[in-house]
Amino acid sequence: MRKVLFSLGTILMCILMASCGKPLDKLQSMVDDMSENGKDWDADQWESFIRDVTDQELAFWESEPTKEDIKAFDKLGKSFKKALSKATKNKKSEKAFEKAIKALDKDDEFEDLNKKMNKAEKKARKAASKKDKDDDEDEDDEDDDDDY
């Protein structure tokens, strides 16, 4: 169970990282849906939900998010964890969730999607960090020009 929650938490974090405009809004609505209805989902619904979340995370990371977008994504990740915990509180929903995770672990297509999403996340985080540093350097250069 701990491994499953960790995997889902990782997926959630990836989703939360995608906090630019539409992907972030879509992820927020997915978290809200899970919070409200997740306790009644069967394994197929959980599997579909996790796939959709991963797709949205990939879309977020590929959208070249800013540092602020990434912070909003991370904040959404915390909400996701709370909603997941609430949705899997009873035995029936917990078993359905675990069954979905096991099915996804065996799915090569999902594994490829997850790897692609993780690569996109690393690339986007690095690009956002570099852009932030470049912006800081540009501001320093402008300040130096004002001194002369």
Image: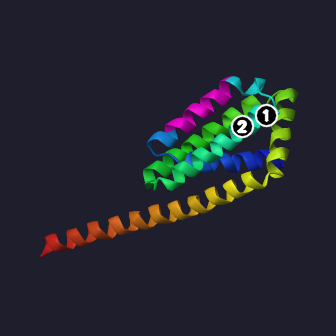
In the picture of the structure, the residue carrying the numbered disc 2 is 48
Magenta stretch, residue numbers: 25-36
What residue is rendered at 66% in x and 23% in y?
A: 36
Q: Residue at x 57, y 63 (%)?
A: 122
Residue reaching furthest to the front:
109
Amino acid type of the residue that numbered disc 2 sits on in the rendered structure: Ser
Q: Nearer the viewer, residue 7 or 59?
A: 59
Left or right of 3: which side holds 127? left
Query: Is disc 1 in contact with disc 2, using a CB cutoff of under 8 Å?
Result: yes
Residue 95 appears in which quarter of the rendering?
A: top right
34 within the magenta span: yes
- Residue at 58%, 44% in the rendered image: 56
Count residues near mark 1 (Cα–Cα under 10 Å), then give few for <14, some for 14-19, many for 20+. Answer: some
- What secondary structure is found at the residue carrying circle 2? helix
Residue 130 spot, x, y in % from top left: 43, 67
- Looking at the rendered image, the quarter that the N terminus falls into is top right
Residue at 81 percent of width and 34 percent of height = 43
**Does the image show residue 74?**
no
Residue 90 horizontal/vertical position (percent) = 83, 27
Residue marked by disc 1? 44
Q: Quadrant of residue 128?
A: bottom left
The residue type indicated by label 1 comes to Asp
